[in-house]
Image (cartoon, helix red, strand yellow):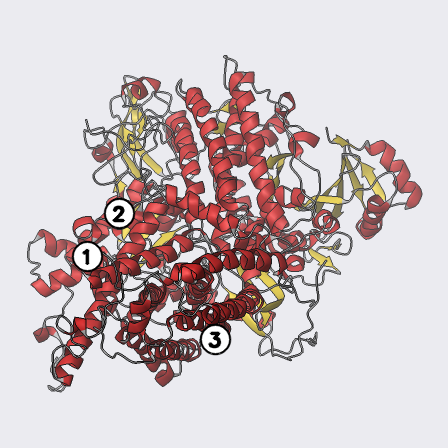
Amino acid sequence: MTTTQELTLKTEPFILNIGPMHPSTHGVFRMRATLDGEVVTDIEPVFGYLHRGIEKLAEERTYTGIIPFTDRLDYLSPMSNNLGYCLAVEKLAGVKVPERGEYIRIITAELQRLANHCVAIGAMFNDAGAYFTPFLYMFRNREKIYDLFDMLCGQRVTYNYMRIGGVSQDLPEEFLPAVAKFLPQLKKFLDEYEFFVKQNEVFVARSKGVGILSKELAINCGISGPVARASGIKHDLRRDDPYSIYDRFEFDIPTAENGDCFDRFYVRVQEMRQSVRILEQAIKQVPDGPFRANVPQVIHPPAGESYAHIESPKGELGYYIVSDGSIAPYRFHIRPTSLINLGALRNMVRGWKVADLIFIFGSIDITMGEVDR
Amino acid sequence: MTTALAATEIVSQLSAQFPGAVEEAGTDAVLVKGEHLPAVVEYLKTAAGLKFDYLNFITAVDYYSYFEVVYRLTSLEFNRYIVLKTRCYTRNKPSVLTLTGIYQGADWQEREIYDLMGISFKGHKNLKRIFLWEGFDGHPLRKDWNR
Amino acid sequence: MEIDENKDYIYDAHELDVHEGQIIEKLKANSQKSIPDPDGWLDEDIKRNIVLTSLDWVIDWARRSSLWPVACFPACCAIEMMAVEGPRFDLSRFGMEILRASPRQADLMITAGTLTWKMAPNVQRIYNQMPDPKWVIAMGTCGISGGIFRSGYNVVPGYNKIIPVDVYIPGCPPRPEAVIYGIQMLQKKIAKSKAVPDLNELPNPLKKGKK
Amino acid sequence: MKFENFGLGIVKGLSVAIQYVWRHALVTQYPEQRLNISRRSRGNELVWSRERCTGCATCAKACPQGVIEIVTATDMTENKYKVETYRVDTGYCIQCGLCVEACPYDALFMGYSYERAKYRRAELVQTNDELLESPQRPVSGYFHPDIAKKLPKQTLLIEKIVEKRK
Amino acid sequence: MEPISAGALDIIQPTYWPGNYWWHWLFYTVVVIVFMLVMVIGAIYFERRAMGKMQTRLGPNRTGPFGLLQPIADAVKVLLKENIVPGVADKIVHFLAPVIAFTPVLLIFTVIPFQNGAMLADLNIGILFIVAVSSIATVGVFMAGWGSGNKYSLLGAMRNVAAVVSYEIPMVLAILGVVMVTGSLSMNDIVNAQNIPNILVQPLGFLLFFTAACAEINRSPFDLMEADSELTAGFHTEYSGMRFAMFYLVEYAEAIAMSAVISTLFLSGWRGPWLPPWLWLIIKTFFVFFLMIWVRTIMPRVRIDQLMGLAWKFLFPLAVINLFATAIEVLAWPDASQWIFVGVNIVLAGALVFLGSRLFKTGLGRVEV
């Protein structure tokens, strides 16, 4: 239900360039917003400020050499990118991943979903104007997850941890007890965070009913992930098209109905709780044994094409690889979740004010590395 | 489990609806002639038993002798997917009919293919470069593009 | 509220893009050689002939203890910049948590991310908009040499192609401690820079054509 | 904008924020207090051991960017190629660790320290003897479990905030 | 504690203390300027440390002992930076804006009593002077927004004008409540009459005044003028060097000025047991300033139409009702002790806030486009 306020005053629209370097465009995203006073009448996004041409560079590198590229695509959740890419190449080369490798992959992917939602929710509050406090509270947990990944693969942001056929190194013995210690801390924190923020009058006023994305428009634009689930689409690849061993865990898919900024925020909070549930089940069942199928560092997959998609924290992340039998892929295409999720930005934002434009854009949670590739 | 719609079953239905549209049917990919593409996709989207309402992605591959544009559609209701392909054999100014009328999600992905691969989409309202700047010469993702 | 659909604004979007394209091509043409590092002070420091008056010392102390970074966060190093600003490796201890969004009030540009040719004119304009005592830290391998994307068609091989860089921090991305170590190296540099120009070196306006 | 619960949400937020005033701030003040970084940490440099290296250049092939330049003698002396120059540009290497993983003779290690910022671009390039292991250039346990065991345990924010001074 | 008659105190503190008029003026001008500068430097340090602590991190602690010299380092550095005036800018307006924005804030301090009768000018219309002077700062801010020829700063300046106009009314009505209870406009008399701090006598008045003051001086949750997540740096986007230092000073000086006014009006200014009176004023000012920091730490920003809605649909009716109720109380029990006022007003405040938030609703803010 949108109330219409007829503006009697005829004002002359002016173009405001919310430029590539803006404090809350999550990277180098540029919008030419046509404003009429404070009301946004039209926006025209301009991309390409972080287009590094990964798809072209990938055609000159071996299949293992591409893994560092996938870390830098959606740099807020590199583990999920690694997982998606490895699944696509394993489907192409027909490699069977041992049990322990699968479990390590699920644990790291779910930890990465927690870390990504931390920044997504925190950045959303920054765009609403809360001066960094909710962001820093959330960043503490991301630091804890950084420690866990640092223990696994030695880097805090670009992990380069998964390999075709499993993972690169085994879990150190103090990893699983640390995760077991981290999960109750996170649950306690999530309750405190909801108490801290969920009923804040100004946040509720800024987010309830703002930037509504209807279900039909979301499906028509191909939107996936928490943004789609907040509009009522009950579609989650971990349940509808279970890859790796997601069918062994029971968890449910949080959805909401009216698809406004508040629902996008709350779906992410609930998804973090579901990820904690999956992690609790996963760390109990990690078997021993090999963590990596014996696949050489330079492989020659048979000629052909394959597409594998996973439920990355931002939505459906897919890798379409065409191979001609040589050591490098013939064509390497990444389904850009963030770029496609932005497809409905224009419809969601028209008619709202400049402050809402920034807030709605923040609630979609995109990463420029994945948009521009 | 998102099952692939059996190509054989769909090919018979499609050739009944649009004679001559389907060139060949691979294991799970259906090769459609360029000019019939929007009609076929419209039919797949609206037909009762099919309901392919979700466009996963569009991409293009340069096979030197021809360009191949790959579409992947999913039906959220019946949890099925289908891969459509069209080919255009000319190397200078290849063009395919646009799907922006049917799927709004196709808009930027088609612009990206135009920008990086050089395939123009007839009927696309705002076909401009999306990633590179206007003065950039050539389309980098083509196999014969050198720096 | 009627807005006539045929947008007759001063310039339409296509014209803007073409103009931007020309700027990029011109910048790409004349920035093939990298700008030499401003490290003149390093040799003098080794030869021990930097003499600072007490006024110099006070001004340098003020400048190095309140460096305000400008928000220049293109890519993955931005996540590590957030970690440096975050609660664990706290940059506000150095008085640097005032993240000025407008370059007018900033004096340190930490280039956290890959620079592409399309972005290069904007970064150069931001650098020029910053008021004078300003420094640049090239953070991360992409900032130093274009890193993993160096052979890309749209990537500038290093920020020192378009702006002079004072400190290089290798790493992809460098740890927050490495960034703080780099900032402290920059503070050492500022501590040794001459803030007050001594008068006899300045060109004397009265003497025509002498200096 | 409605005040459903009469400003209670604001009071809740205030109560949570005030609790942190008397809690311990989780800051490691870097120059004085330092964290024990991970045993498999990929520091900002490569460490190369001249004795084990046989000059097979598998590392140069495995590197996605071709950062490692290796020039060896042509003849084989006691089945080793004598390596003349082995140059790594740390400003160009992204520390992805694929070379350490690929080296069949365990001659290559990732560095353990991260304080490698420089003033000059040229200083970032390290050649032969600068790459050898030394007390200033410790070795990390990345892909070397035996070295990892000897390194100190990592400080986890889950357990404690800062490494107690020994 | 019965009110101290002005005469008895003459021995300690004659109103024109250093005798000659000019000596008095000189002494108090120096006191006001030094007080304002020291308090602003203290406020900058206090805010960065307090917010740091509340965000599980530490504030600046490396420059000087415990980081105490950090604001001084900031000031010295900002004063010595290059002054850039954008080519598009309207030079004179761009130059004058910080001056016009800064002087009113200094004038507010002239009327605030540090001790009984110890202020630069013991105006008998003290509080009216403050309200009048504090709205001149808006002219300076709008000149800054318009003068720098930048779309973002223009947007910030327009928002400032709209906000200050709307929040002037609830602010004045809240002050009227206090004036009616004390019976005089002079700040000194207000403080002398406050045996029970006005925050108890006028609880709703305090709430309204605090909210309206936060909106006037661009403090969160109403900091739309310098909304750094939307309008990069609001109205002072194009200012650098010395002029930006003036605006940075104005931001904190206004916060300290409003906290001093609030503590004078509602927390009985310099009155308090053991400590010297002027120290009480500083403690109370820092307490109110801490309230502002505390609110700023957790609150997101209000949108511009909600800001307007809140002023006109929530604060204004409450202020009128509060004024009306106070009038009835003053007339009904002219000589009774004020504790009756306290009881009645607290109950009234609770009822009004409950009723107000039940009825208050702004539009959704979406314009059909």
Taking the spot 31% from the left edge, 33% from the top edge, the residue there is D161
Distance between the alpha carbons at the discs numbered 3 and 2: 44 Å
Q: Who's the residue at 59% across and 43% down the image?
A: A266
Which label sits in the foreground, 1 or 3? 1
Which label was assigned to residue E161? 3
Query: Callout 2, which amino acid?
Result: Gly
Amino acid type, label 1: Leu
Tell me which chain the residue with mark 1 is part of.
E
Q: Is residue E158 left or right of residue E64?
A: right
Percent x, y of residue B85: 75, 43
Of the numbered discs in the image, which one, if any, rests on residue B78?
Answer: none
Q: In the image, is A115 to the left or to the right of D57?
A: right
Identify the residue at the far right of this view.
B16
Chain containing the residue with disc 2:
C
For this rendering, which residue is in front, D159 or A94?
A: D159
Q: Position of residue E130 (x, y in %)?
A: 35, 76
| Amino acid under disc 3 | Val
Which label's residue is closer to the chain start, 1 or 3? 3
Establish whether labels 3 and 2 are both on one chain.
Answer: no
Dot 3: chain letter: E
Asked if marks 1 and 3 fall on the same chain, the answer is yes
The residue beneath circle 2 is C182
Please say whether residue B134 is visible from this viewpoint.
no
- Horizontal side of B38 relative to E297 (left or right) equals right
Instruction: Describe the element under mark 3 as helix, strand or loop.
Output: helix
- Residue C102 screen position, x and y as percent: 39, 64
